[in-house]
Amino acid sequence: MKLLKSLNLRGWLLVGTAACGVVLAGAVATLGSSARAGAALEERKLPMKFNWIACEPNCRGWVSAVGIITADTPRDFEEFSRGRQLGGATVVLDSSGGSVNDAITLGRRFRNLGLLTTVGVSVQSRGGQTVRAAVAPEAYCESMCVFLLLAGKKRYVPEAAHVRVHQIWMGDRADDAKAASYSAQDLMIVERDIGRLAKYTFDMGGAGDLLSLALSIPPWEDLHELDTGELKLTNLVTTDLVADVLPHVDISAPAMVELAPKTQARFGSEPEHPAKSTKTAEALVPTGGVVATPGAASQK
């Protein structure tokens, strides 16, 4: 069997240094219907897509980023941003994670643009001839979302958001991590990419406490949900005011958004075969509720 070239966020304890997944949620609003919640869940399983959510004349609007980070995501963002004045805009994230190195690339691009970050489900509802835009905060942000969050110059997490972390692991062995075997080259790949993650985390202003919390959760346990104190301790939150990232957005009752199956973020380069790469970008729920990503390491 060929050596795995990619790993997912699910077992950083393997090497002893890491960063893990956390992300935030934005301003509050009503989703409108259970059908819309179901659509949001399905979108979260797919490769990440970017959309501009307009809310003129009351606010500038924001970028909706929904789905799994893949090798194509940085390029897709460049295509999306072409011809747009995105400097200083807000990105609302709704993601279960994905490729580690591609998330780092995308995060650095976010920081270069001076973007602000939060997490939630972007919603647009039509009333007569007007379109109302809002953000539902009841969202789950896990794994590599933390690096996209950290890329924001300002970062906000609403109380209704679920921000969860854990270690990284080899994706094809995450279902039975204790019984699996690992080669020296597997460990080399993990250590190399953990080094990249650690540097990125500190470059973006993340605290060492984030690494410590992530390293305490092995792949055979449930993800750890960060409470308000931990979000501040890890420096994932830089403001308590939603208006600092989404000014003039109406605030109403939060909508319930169903949790997507956890996707394991992938370390290293993409698999050689495109078919495998597409497969690993999907969120699949095997027995036990942990996502098994063939040919990649993963995070719950």
Image (cartoon, rainbow, N blue to C red):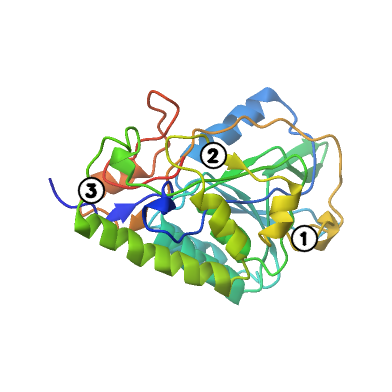
Q: CA distance from mark 2 to mark 1?
A: 27 Å
Check disc 3 and give the amino acid type. Answer: Tyr
Percent coordinates x, y for residue 261 in the rendering: 49, 33
Residue designated by label 1 = 245
Nearest to N terminus: mark 2 or mark 1: 2
Query: Which residue is at a point 71% across and 45% down the rendered structure image?
Result: 227
- The mark found on residue 223 in the picture is 2
Percent coordinates x, y for residue 147 in the rendering: 55, 60
Query: Which residue is at a point 77% across and 60% down the rendered structure image?
Result: 245
Q: Are marks 1 and 3 in contact (CB under 8 Å)?
A: no
Q: Residues within 10 Å of mark 3 (few under 14, many from 20)?
A: few
Nearest to N terminus: mark 2 or mark 3: 3
Query: Which residue is at a point 51% across and 70% down the rendered structure image?
Result: 200
240 with respect to 104 (left or right): right
- The mark found on residue 48 in the picture is none
Check disc 2 and give the amino acid type. Answer: Leu
Q: Secondary structure at mark 3?
A: loop
Discs 2/1, front:
2
Nearest to N terminus: mark 1 or mark 3: 3
Q: Residue furthest left?
A: 1
User: Can residue 21 be seen?
Assistant: no
Q: Are marks 2 and 3 in contact (CB under 8 Å)?
A: no
Image: 81 above or below 68: below
Check disc 1 and give the amino acid type. Answer: Val
Q: Where on the picture, by quarter, is residue 110?
A: bottom right
Q: Where on the picture, by quarter, is residue 150?
A: bottom right
- The mark found on residue 182 in the picture is 3
Q: CA distance from mark 1 to mark 3?
A: 43 Å
Q: Are marks 2 and 1 in contact (CB under 8 Å)?
A: no
Q: Secondary structure at mark 2?
A: loop
